[in-house]
Image: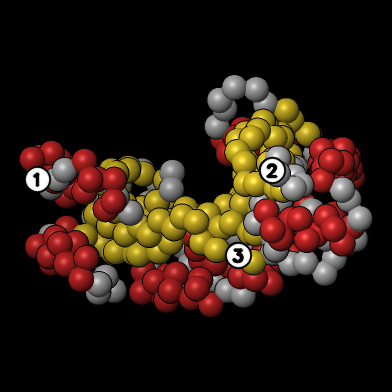
Amino acid sequence: MLLPKTHKEDAVIKFLEAFQDKITGVLSCFDRVVFHGHLPVTSPTGMEAFLQRQGVLLKNLKPFVTQQADRLKQHAHAICAKAKRPFIYLEGYTRKEDKARALAERDGIQRGLVCVISVVEPCRSFALRYGEKRPRLKASRRKCLALYYYFIDRVFGLMHVRIQTWFPFQIQIYLNGHEWLARKLKQYGIAHARLDNAFTWIADVDRAQRFADRITDTKWCRVFGALARRVNPLLADLLHPFEYYWVTDQAEFATDVMFKDRAALQTVYPKLLRHSTLSLSAEDVLTSGSLRPSCVESTPSPAFVTAIS
């Protein structure tokens, strides 16, 4: 059983050592991860230079960017029509991932496009700033239509690619490390059980941990570049030869602690709750993560897990 080794996880190591007779396995892996993609036209000066090369005057900025936004929307509709999947416009708050997952389950989607969800959201864009000599561009916050492409990927499982339809076309890619690892375990025939977003039992935990450690070997730029070309048709003409550069925006790292049975966790969990309530501040909770109990009855014996992310 592999244990975490970083200094920040000393408390976790001590916990595992104290209750090792009640624990069947421990697995650490990336959980929810969000990447952002940026084009070289993200800054006002970069955008001005791009418009100059295109022969677009600043006074014609709005009709130009509106035309490109329409191309992105038409592309999304065409992708949905070709795959015979729905294009959905949402108003108000809705958990988009839950809706996409429900659609995939309802329609038996195992791979490929599930749907495209469009929603008006805040975005970073540009506005004209009038000065003494000539107008210039400035960074500005506004609202625009965002397109969420939900896919079930062969490697990563359910994921989404979000693109804003207004310049500079920032992209967000979301994936889940637990989802990726579950597919890897299935590929290599390693029996396991999951509940919600955690593993409750794994037949070979050490081998699973070795797989989990290899996710960082992924050729991310190559994977994300292909996804960007699927959702942004402008990369083939107007934006050629631009490419996105990618940054990690959010990364959750979780440790799943799998207990032998219900009774084993019940003897520990109340103490954990009491300790966290009396000892941890709001800042600790927000920066260090969460403790979540889960139960599954389908493993060889009822197993519990806590995820510390």
Query: Closer to the observer: label 1 or label 2?
Result: 2
Q: Residue furthest front?
A: 132
Q: How is the image coloured?
A: secondary structure
Could you tell me how many numbered marks the image carries? Answer: 3
**309 to the left or right of 243:** left
Classify the position of the N terminus by image quarter.
bottom left
What label does residue 279 carry, if any? 1
Residue with the mark numbered 2? 131
Residue with the mark numbered 3? 246
The answer to whether residue 179 is seen in the rendering is no
Q: CA distance from mark 3 to mark 1?
A: 38 Å
Residue at the spot 53% in from the left edge and 77% down from the top edge: 217
What label does residue 74 carry, if any? none
**140 to the left or right of 309:** right
Mark 3 and mark 1 lie on one chain; the one further toward the N terminus is 3
Assess whether mark 2 and mark 1 are in contact (beta carbons under 8 angstroms): no
Assess whether mark 1 and mark 3 are in contact (beta carbons under 8 angstroms): no
Mark 3 and mark 2 lie on one chain; the one further toward the N terminus is 2
Instruction: Look at label 2 and name its amino acid.
Output: Gly
Residue at the spot 35% in from the left edge and 57% down from the top edge: 254
**Residue at disc 1, secondary structure:** helix
Q: Nearer the viewer, residue 238 or 116?
A: 238
Classify the position of the C terminus by image quarter.
bottom left
**Residue at disc 2, secondary structure:** loop
Q: Residues within 10 Å of mark 2 (few under 14, many from 20)?
A: few
Query: Closer to the observer: label 3 or label 1?
Result: 3
- Where does the image place residue 34, in percent across and percent down from the top left? 53, 54
Instruction: Look at label 3 and name its amino acid.
Output: Trp
- Where does the image place residue 5, in percent across and percent down from the top left? 25, 74
Mark 1 and mark 2 lie on one chain; the one further toward the N terminus is 2
Q: Residues within 10 Å of mark 1 (few under 14, many from 20)?
A: few
